[in-house]
Amino acid sequence: MANSKFAYVKQLEEERRVLPCCYFAVRIDGGGFKAFTKTHGYTKPNDVRGVHLMNACAKEVMLKFDEIDLAYGHSDEYSFLFRRKTKLWNRRHDKILTNIVSCFAASFPFHWSEFFPEQKLLYVPCFDGRIVLLPTEREAKDYFRWRQVDCHINTQYNECFWNLVMRGGYSHQQAYNTLMTTQKREKNELLFSRFGINYNEVPEIFRRGSILMRGEQSWKGGSKVVSGGGEASPQGEAEMPPQDDAMVSPQDEAEMPPQGEAEMPPQGEAEMPPQDEAEMPPLNEATVPPLDQPISAAAPPRKPNREAKLTLSHENLVSDHFWEKYHRLLGQ
């Protein structure tokens, strides 16, 4: 960057770093997807084409950023788990978040015609993102358990709602009112008694969501992405997750719980320098390393690793069996 008398304004940029030695997840959510799916003719209650498209976008992210060993997605969201010791871009919060979201969002229209060949993309969707700090293995596991339980709740509700509308002749409001006071068991009974649907036989790709894992041989040696170089299955059981699990939402609430936004705490406002000064001295120079300092000056930028082996699965994340089977996912 040119060193001019105007360079002091760079000190006004807000730069946050993800806490060291912690796992963290980048979660991407679609914006306005209800209208998007309606406009583009998605089938209800579930459209496998849309699921495969989201999985293809997630795969692009994992091929580009080899600091990610595990990803999970359902509906219009996807979460990517970064290694505890990752040094990607000096763990700069905004740099990581914006690159992951933009890579995913750009992949969506890129792969659209592969899964919707007869439907023209009328407009591009929007995605937002957030970083969730996960200090230990327990929080990392519980985070993905939480997302899969949410997938179960949403899928069961949508199965009931759209069968009432499309096969039961209900209006949207009537279907909503019917389900408003129902619990999980009553929803299962409604599906089976009225429409002959056994919820446990709904395809696992809808009930459990999609899990993407990096193959063991693909991540030996770790990532060499440097600052400024932005590049970098078996089926499980059919039963629902145990309802006494600490991460399961209360089943006495009939409606799908609203998804809270993980907002970051407000940042302090930087004070403007006197106008007669040409430059402002670096902030916290004694303790904070330069933001443009590379992790390793000798390490070249990485290109997407197209040879990396990624495994797609639809297993039970709530049980300990998954985490024991794939213990390497949290090993770095």
Image (tube, rainbow, N blue to C red):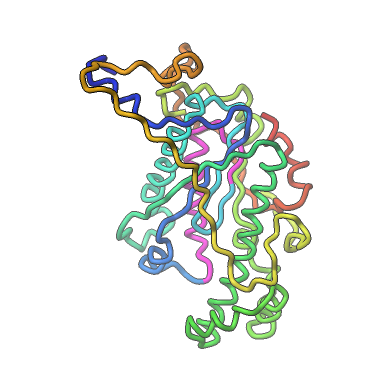
Magenta stretch: residue 87 in it? no
Question: Which x, y percent locates residue 249?
Answer: 67, 62
Q: Residue at x 49, y 47 (%)?
A: 263
Residue 289 relative to residue 72: left or right: left
Question: Which x, y percent locates residue 262?
Answer: 52, 49
Q: In this view, does 311 lie above or below 9?
A: below
Q: Residue at x 72, y 75 (%)?
A: 185
Question: Which x, y percent locates residue 153?
Answer: 63, 65
Q: Can residue 309 be seen in this view?
A: no
Residue 199 relative to residue 305: left or right: right
Q: In this orientation, which residue lies closer to the viewer: 96 or 56?
A: 96
Q: Is residue 188 above or below residue 10?
A: below
Magenta stretch: residue 58 in it? yes
Q: In this orientation, which residue lies closer to the viewer: 52 or 89?
A: 89
Q: In this view, does 235 lie above or below 95?
A: below
Residues drawn in magenta: 45-71
Q: Which residue is drawn at 70% across and 31% down?
A: 331
Count numbered badges in the picture: 0
Q: Quadrant of the C terminus?
A: top right
Q: Quadrant of residue 269?
A: top left
Question: Which x, y percent locates residue 37?
Answer: 41, 65
Q: In which quarter of the image is the N terminus?
A: top left
Task: Return the residue found at the far top.
Answer: 298
Q: Can residue 326 be seen in this view?
A: yes
Q: Residue at x 56, y 56 (%)?
A: 74
Q: In which quarter of the image is residue 323?
A: top right
